[in-house]
Amino acid sequence: MRKQTLALLTCAALTLPISSLADEVEHYEGKESATLKEAVANFSEYNEKLENILSGELDAEAMNEIHQLTYTLENALGKINEEFDGLAVTLEEIHLGSERADAEGVASNGKSYLETSRTVIE
């Protein structure tokens, strides 16, 4: 009987409207990352902010701060992923060009690749 009651309570909880909880949470735009350079800067800055908050008590105020800063982190990470998808394509062009001994293509793609990759590392 106890297992049946637990199963019924679980089913009932799963049927509650989750959207009502989401409606209570305020949504933010977050800081935009228009370029890879901005995205890397925002990613670094807001990861540091997240780390600082996580080192303290995770009370309601901290949770609100984390909620707000994740919008900026999501924007930055989206831009970084977008740029790195293109970077992978460029690297593949370098690889294929090296197999074909296409010096002009390798030089052109190599310059583009290094310019983008150096935005993230130095």
Image (tube, helix red, strand yellow):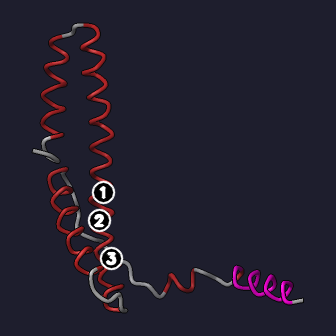
Sequence-first tag of 2 and 3: 3
Residue 7: horizontal and vertical position, in percent? Answer: 80, 82
Q: Which residues are magenta?
A: 2-14
Q: Is residue 91 left or right of residue 9?
A: left
**Which residue sits at x=19%, y=16%?**
105
Quadrant of the rendered image containing residue 45: bottom left
For the C terminus, the quadrant is top left
Viewer-nearest residue: 119 or 1? 1
Q: Where is mark 3, residue-wise?
A: 28
Alpha-carbon neighbours of circle 2 within 10 Å: few (<14), some, or many (≥20)?
A: many
Position of 23 compared to 5: left or right?
A: left
Q: CA distance from mark 2 to mark 3?
A: 12 Å
Q: Which residue is mark 2?
A: 73
Looking at this view, name the residue that lies furthest to the bottom: 60
The spot of residue 100 in percent (x, y) is 27, 7
The span from disc 1 to disc 3 (Cα, nearest Å) is: 16 Å
The relative height of residue 111 versus residue 68 in the rendered view (above or below) is above
Three-letter amino acid code at disc 1? Leu
Q: Where is mark 1, residue-wise?
A: 77
Mark 1 near mark 2, Cβ–Cβ under 8 Å? yes
Residue 47: numbered disc: none
In this picture, residue 8 sits left or right of residue 51:
right
